[in-house]
Image (cartoon, helix red, strand yellow):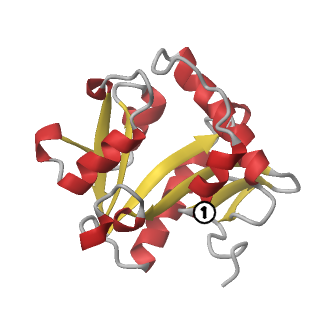
């Protein structure tokens, strides 16, 4: 099944979900920066400067990239996910974290927000996780922010107490902690499949 047909019918009207195609890194970088500005406005992070391409492209290459595009247009959102054990710094050397499909990022251009694009991307990630028999989808996110923790909670994700994090989950949580943000302002969430 091609990357354009794998998630047919999952997106809201006027959009479609597919896998990333060559040459899209700069468009996804712009979406990442635009979505990051919402976290600045929410007071969660201090800056949403674009991640330089020489760091952003390797990030993309370590993940499977799901893209939401406007029909007849370009990308408007994306999700980056990979098996937790395969992501550097996740304890993957001994297989810890295997079975958890980790959502490292879900970003939607604010101009296309509140239309179901983020929910469709999340559903595509969950479907892909199921195809490969992952037991759960995990992520770290901003605590108490409506379009972060509350968004995922409405979709069946549960917060994991910091005391209950496995070493792989704790390591990934710390690796994704934005600069200058206290760990108590973020949380790990899991949805069992």
162 with respect to 188 (left or right): left
Q: Residue at x 44, y 31 (%)?
A: 178
128 with respect to 69 (left or right): left
x, y percent for residue 41: 56, 16
136 with respect to 24 (left or right): left
Q: Residue at x 68, y 54 (%)?
A: 68
25 with respect to 134 (left or right): right
Residue 11 in sight here: no
Which quadrant of the rendered structure holds the N terminus? bottom right
Q: Residue at x 33, y 31 (%)?
A: 186
Q: Please tell me which residue lies in front, 14 or 148.
A: 148
Residue 183 in sight here: yes
Q: Please tell me which residue lies in front, 168 or 137.
A: 168
Total number of numbered discs in the rendering:
1
Which residue is label 1 attached to?
61
Give the answer, above or below, for where 108 lies relative to 142.
Answer: below
Would you identify the image quadrant in which residue 22 lies?
bottom right
Give the answer, above or below, for where 89 lies relative to 135.
Answer: above
Q: Please tell me which residue lies in front, 159 or 58.
A: 58
Would you identify the image quadrant in which residue 24 lies?
bottom right
Q: Secondary structure at mark 1?
A: helix
Label 1 packing within 10 angstroms: few (<14), some (14-19), many (20+): few
x, y percent for residue 118: 57, 46
Most extreme residue toward the bottom is: 1
Q: Please tell me which residue lies in front, 130 or 13.
A: 130
x, y percent for residue 21: 75, 66
x, y percent for residue 187: 29, 36
């Amino acid at each position: 099944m091609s990357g354009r047909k794998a998630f047919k019918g999952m997106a809201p009207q006027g959009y479609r979900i597919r896998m990333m195609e060559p040459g899209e890194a700069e468009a996804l970088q712009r979406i990442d920066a635009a979505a990051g500005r919402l976290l600045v406005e929410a007071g969660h992070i201090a800056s949403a400067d674009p991640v330089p391409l020489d760091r952003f492209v390797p990030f993309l290459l370590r993940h499977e990239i799901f893209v939401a595009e406007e029909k007849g247009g370009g990308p408007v959102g994306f999700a980056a996910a990979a098996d937790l054990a395969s992501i550097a710094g996740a304890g993957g050397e001994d297989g810890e974290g295997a079975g958890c499909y980790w959502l490292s990022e879900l970003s939607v251009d604010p101009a296309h927000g509140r239309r179901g694009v983020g929910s469709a991307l999340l559903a595509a990630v969950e479907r892909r996780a199921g195809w490969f028999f992952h037991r759960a989808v995990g992520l770290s996110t901003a605590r108490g922010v409506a379009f972060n923790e509350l968004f995922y909670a409405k979709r069946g994700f549960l917060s994991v107490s910091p005391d209950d994090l496995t070493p792989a989950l704790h390591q990934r949580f710390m690796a994704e902690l934005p600069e200058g943000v206290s760990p108590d302002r973020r949380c790990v969430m899991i949805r069992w499949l």
